[in-house]
Amino acid sequence: MKSNRASYEASAQNVKHFTVHSDVLIDVLYVLQRSGIRYQINEIDRDRNNVILMVSTGKSASHEEKALKNIEYILSEYMDFMIGL
């Protein structure tokens, strides 16, 4: 019964998955916490130092959209930095 409830809640919201390297994990979690966005750690890949986060947002909250864009920017800048090394 509990899994049906969880799947219903997930369908009522936008769900995104992010692969976050441990170097920027604290930054991403900070943005999520400050914005009050729900998240769940789905997987930890110790070999690649990555965490896969599932992020659930409401359908029309502009502050949540801004936070997600901020996270995407952090991840993009980190990737650009790693390519430049």
Image: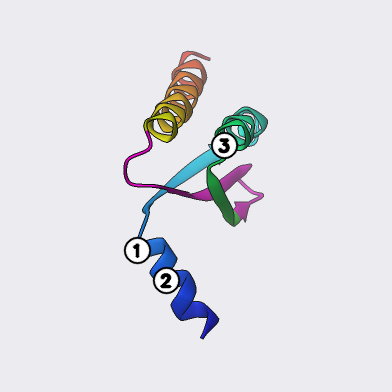
Q: Which residue is disc 1 drawn over? A: 11
Q: Is residue 73 above or below residue 47?
A: above
In the image, taking residue 55 as reference, residue 45 lies left or right, namely right
Q: Give me the residue at 53% from left, 42% from top.
A: 37
Mark 2 in CB contact with mark 1 (< 8 angstroms):
yes
- 10 Å crowding of disc 1: few (<14), some (14-19), many (20+): few
Looking at the rendering, the stretch of residues picked out in magenta corresponds to 44-61
Q: Nearer the viewer, residue 70 or 48?
A: 70
- 10 Å crowding of disc 3: few (<14), some (14-19), many (20+): some
The residues bearing labels 1 and 3 have C-alpha atoms spaced at a distance of 20 Å
The residues bearing labels 2 and 1 have C-alpha atoms spaced at a distance of 6 Å
Identify the disc placed on residue 7.
2
Q: Check residue 14 for magenta coloring.
A: no
Query: Would you identify the image quadrant in which residue 63 lies?
Result: top left
The residues bearing labels 2 and 3 have C-alpha atoms spaced at a distance of 21 Å
Q: Amino acid at mark 1?
A: Ser
Q: Tell me the SS state at disc 1.
A: helix
User: Could you say where residue 62 lies in the image, as x and y percent from the top left?
Assistant: 37, 31
Q: Which residue is disc 3 drawn over? A: 32
Q: Amino acid at mark 3?
A: Leu
User: Could you say where residue 82 lies in the image, as x and y percent from the top left?
Assistant: 51, 21
In the image, taking residue 4 as reference, residue 41 lies left or right, namely right
- 10 Å crowding of disc 2: few (<14), some (14-19), many (20+): few
Q: Tell me the SS state at disc 3.
A: helix
Number of numbered callouts drawn:
3
Q: Earlier in the sequence, mark 2 or mark 3?
A: 2
Q: Amino acid at mark 2?
A: Ser
Residue at the farthest top position: 84
Q: Tell me the SS state at disc 2.
A: helix
Q: Earlier in the sequence, mark 1 or mark 3?
A: 1
User: Could you say where residue 66 lies in the image, as x and y percent from the top left?
Assistant: 41, 26
Q: Is residue 75 above or below residue 60?
A: above
